[in-house]
Image: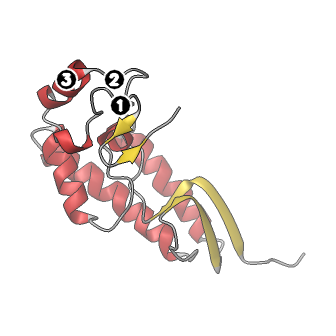
Amino acid sequence: MRSIDLVVAGDVVYNQCHMYVGDTTPESRENWIAALDRLAALNPKIVVAGHKKPGAPDTPAAIEATKRYLRDFGRLKESSASDRELFDAMTERYPDWVSHQTWLMFGLAPPPRCTLGCRRRGAERGLPTSVQPRPGRPGAVGPRRWSA
């Protein structure tokens, strides 16, 4: 059988896009990295990520970048004193990646009807107000819109 050297990776590979890692554990991240190693072993020439920055190339480099991100997240999570510190460290390390929402990175989905209270709760966790749900704008998170 002939190969077309293509991997359609779904949610396993991200391409220049912050990842949903809020529910991960060290073990689940290692399992994720093992799955990425299996994809890399296929030696694809084209890798289509499930989540990507518009215009990012569909290359195997996305596999390695995903692995690096997961390792960085795990290392920084261990050394960060708060979610805010971790968020800042990850966005500093990956400044050009899209999806800088704390709800995405930490699994903090905004409630369907956001009030001033949700903004305060985010501040209590040490999260930057610029990326917390905005009061009076259901589903609005930072400069982007979120919809269920």
Q: Residue at x 12, y 26 (%)?
A: 124
Q: In the displayed structure, does residue 2 sit left or right of residue 51?
A: right
Residue depicted at x 64% and y 76%: 46
Q: Earlier in the sequence, mark 3 or mark 2?
A: 2
Q: Amino acid at mark 1?
A: Arg
Count of numbered circles on the image: 3
Q: Are marks 2 and 1 in contact (CB under 8 Å)?
A: yes
Counting other residues with Cα less than 10 Å from the Cα at mark 1, is it few (<14), some (14-19), or many (20 or more)?
Answer: few
Instruction: Please provide percent x and percent y for residue 61.
Output: 49, 76
Q: Is 112 placed above or below 10 here?
A: above
Task: Point out the image quarter for the N terminus.
Answer: bottom right
Q: Residue at x 38, y 53 (%)?
A: 99
- Asked whether, in this view, residue 45 is left or right of residue 29, the answer is right
> What residue sits 19% from the left and 62% below the top?
92
Question: Which residue corresponds to mark 1?
Answer: 137
Image location (x, y in percent) of residue 37: 53, 64
> Residue 4: image x %, image y %?
79, 78
Q: Is residue 46 left or right of residue 108?
A: right
Mark number, residue 114? 2
| Residue at the spot of label 3 | 121
- Residue projecting furthest to the left: 81
| Amino acid residing under circle 3 | Arg
Q: Residue 14, percent across and down?
A: 49, 59
Looking at the rendered image, the disc whose residue lies closer to the viewer, 2 or 1, is: 1
Farthest residue, direction right: 1
Depth check, mark 1 against mark 3: the one in front is 1
Q: Quadrant of residue 138?
A: top left
Picture quadrant where residue 65 is located: bottom left
Furthest-front residue in view? 136
